[in-house]
Image (cartoon, coloured by chain):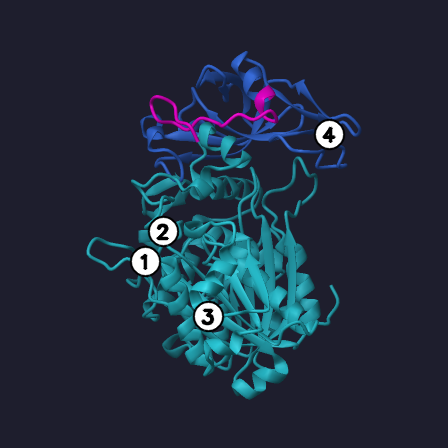
Chain colours: A cyan, B blue
């Protein structure tokens, strides 16, 4: 990729609705309501109106609850917006980052000047993965399910368990290293009123939590929530008229369906971030030591550790050592998942969790992260990570570098 | 997707995938081999993932392999609750001697005994009149 998108656009607003575990007695909102709620927060933050997006861009993430043939246009109708360009995110947890890159390219090309990007899902209220509910048609349609469901594959816990077992076979890593990541995210969640699980836990509690799919335990797993998020991206020129705190896109890199080695027998301990991250760093013109805060895609600690390696923060296989040596808290020398991440914050469906690292990075760069604010945060690295390919580890890997200065 | 009488999911069989299920029902493991570059791959694809050749032939592969990775499930997640009676399910990625990898449940092996590199042999569990699922046991 060329460096042509560097500093071209900036995030000027963001929103994240309260999350819900859909417990009995709670009011159950629909996906559309969460989308509108998140969009309203983002518009308020930017001081904009929905009318500012007539003739502009509307990005809509795929949602498991609302899989229709015409979803993004239907959302435009429900919101009463007449966009020139619809951008559809279809890459699971990489959708939010992918839509930022697509929007930036459209803004760069002069097709639009700005875009409102939304995503929401209600995995606990639809046929999905919630206990007691049947699987959604989306999860049981298609060839991948035919060769997983009847074979006894137990979803993401099982699939990431397979990746983790292989990783631990090839490299020196202790469960304590993963535990440190989980404990840190919970600590950060305790500082974030929007996180779904806020009670801190100890490393011992992590080590002894219930095994779900060995070696993956309860406190390794992302909790599902209902919720919605949104961000607003605008050309750098317009951004300056909207806010004095734009969060600029400095670099991006992306790969889907990356193979490390052979296509039929790849090394599943390596993710596509080995390609996406260097691209993003090059475009941004930044080095690893320039990164003030890292917002990884953190549905499982193992995946966070693999991102640290594949981004090049440390060598392959040395992620465990790296985690042990660094302070991962917002006050530390390598702050990660400062909002509590998805691990403790909650994941509003597999496709929407990818908004969280972007929204939190924007909050950090704008100095709006309150008690979990990283001091003088000016450059953030952000991950999008979507989908689990058959017997491998990461369908879409996206790295974004965001900064408070162009 | 249809369900087995006891509730486990059944595959919706298509013309693309039928050879696999029919062979498994007959106790054989078959996969697609590229007619141009010879790549063997699983699961069924519309063309060769190495060279893009559309001509793929179903060939029998050796039903032996090694455990590439494993994870034993103690809960049913993102699958049908009927799997509950089978727990714990020792799930593996099996690397077949002929090349491809596949998900496969390891039977006849307690969870604490499964190891990467373990030699395994396929066996076939019928799930309907039209299909069986390959599972593996230690050799």
User: At which x and y percent is residue B80?
Assistant: 37, 33
Residue at numbered disc 1: A202
Q: In this view, does A137 lie above or below A307?
A: above
Residue at mark 4 to residue at mark 1: CA–CA distance: 49 Å
Q: Can residue A285 be seen here? A: no
Q: Does the magenta stretch include residue B12?
A: yes
The outermost residue toward the top is: B26
Badge number at residue A360: 3
* Disc 1 element: loop
Using residue A166 as the reference point, say whether residue A7 is left or right of it.
right
Discs 4/1, front: 4
Q: Give the range drawn in magenta.
A: B1-19
Q: Can residue B128 be seen here? A: yes
Q: In this view, does A334 lie above or below A391?
A: below
Residue at numbered disc 4: B39
Discs 2/1, front: 2
Q: Which residue is drawn at 60% across and 50% down?
A: A271
Residue at mark 2 to residue at mark 3: CA–CA distance: 22 Å
Which quadrant holds the N terminus of chain B?
top left
User: At which x and y percent is residue A10?
Assistant: 58, 77
Residue at mark 4 to residue at mark 2: CA–CA distance: 40 Å
The outermost residue toward the right is: B36
Task: Please check whether the numbered discs 1 and 3 fall on a single chain.
Answer: yes
Residue at mark 1 to residue at mark 3: CA–CA distance: 24 Å
Q: Which residue is drawn at 37% across and 69% down?
A: A37
Q: Which chain carries label 4?
A: B
CB under 8 Å between callouts 4 and 2? no
Residue at mark 2 to residue at mark 1: CA–CA distance: 11 Å
Viewer-nearest residue: A279 or A270: A279
Residue at numbered disc 2: A219
Q: Which chain carries label 2?
A: A
* Disc 4 element: loop
């Amino acid at each position: 990729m060329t460096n042509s998108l560097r500093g071209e656009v900036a995030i000027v607003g963001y929103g994240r609705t309260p999350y819900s575990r859909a417990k009995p007695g709670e009011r159950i909102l629909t996906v559309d309501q969460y989308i509108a709620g998140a969009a309203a927060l983002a518009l308020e933050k930017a001081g904009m109106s929905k009318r500012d997006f007539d003739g502009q861009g509307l990005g809509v993430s795929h949602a498991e609850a609302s899989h229709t043939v015409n979803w993004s246009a239907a959302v435009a109708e429900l919101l009463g917006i007449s966009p020139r360009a619809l951008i559809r995110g279809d890459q699971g947890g990489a959708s939010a980052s992918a839509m930022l890159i697509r929007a930036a390219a459209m803004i760069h090309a002069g097709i639009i000047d700005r875009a409102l990007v939304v995503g929401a899902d209600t995995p606990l209220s639809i046929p999905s993965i919630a206990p007691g509910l049947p699987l959604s048609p989306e999860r049981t349609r298609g060839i991948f399910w035919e060769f997983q469901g009847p074979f006894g594959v137990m979803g993401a816990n099982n699939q990431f368990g397979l990746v983790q077992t292989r990783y631990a076979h090839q490299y020196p890593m202790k469960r304590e290293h993963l535990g440190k990541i989980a404990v840190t995210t919970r600590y950060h969640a305790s500082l974030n009123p929007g996180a779904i699980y806020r009670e801190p836990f100890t490393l011992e509690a992590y080590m002894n939590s219930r095994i779900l799919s060995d070696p993956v335990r309860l406190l390794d797993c992302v909790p599902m929530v209902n919720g919605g998020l949104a961000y607003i991206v605008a050309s750098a020129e317009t951004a300056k008229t909207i806010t004095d705190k734009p969060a600029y896109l400095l670099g991006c890199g992306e790969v889907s369906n990356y193979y490390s080695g052979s296509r039929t027998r790849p090394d599943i301990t390596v993710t596509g971030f080995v390609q996406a991250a260097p691209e993003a760093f090059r475009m941004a013109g930044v080095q690893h030591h320039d990164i003030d805060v890292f917002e990884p895609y953190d549905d499982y600690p193992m995946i966070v550790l693999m991102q640290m390696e594949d981004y090049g923060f440390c060598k392959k296989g040395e992620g465990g050592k790296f985690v042990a040596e660094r302070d991962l808290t917002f006050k530390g020398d390598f702050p990660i998942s400062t909002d509590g991440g998805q691990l403790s914050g909650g994941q509003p469906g597999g496709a929407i969790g990818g908004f969280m690292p972007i929204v939190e990075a924007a909050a950090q760069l704008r100095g709006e992260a309150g008690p979990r604010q990283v001091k003088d945060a000016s450059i953030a690295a952000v991950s999008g990570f979507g989908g689990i390919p058959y017997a491998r580890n990461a369908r879409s890997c996206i790295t974004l570098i965001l900064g408070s200065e162009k | 997707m249809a369900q087995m009488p006891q509730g486990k999911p059944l595959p919706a069989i298509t013309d693309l995938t039928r050879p696999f299920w029919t062979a498994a029902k007959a106790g054989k493991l078959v996969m697609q081999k590229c007619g141009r570059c010879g790549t063997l791959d699983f699961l069924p694809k519309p063309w060769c993932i190495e060279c893009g050749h559309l001509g793929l032939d179903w060939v029998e592969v050796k039903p032996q392999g090694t455990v590439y990775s494993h994870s034993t499930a103690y809960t049913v997640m993102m699958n049908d609750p009927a799997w509950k009676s089978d727990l714990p399910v020792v799930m593996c990625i099996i690397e077949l001697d002929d090349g491809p990898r596949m998900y496969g449940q390891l039977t006849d092996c307690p969870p604490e005994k499964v190891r990467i590199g373990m030699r395994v042999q396929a066996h076939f569990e019928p799930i309907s009149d039209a299909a069986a699922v390959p599972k593996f046991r230690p050799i």
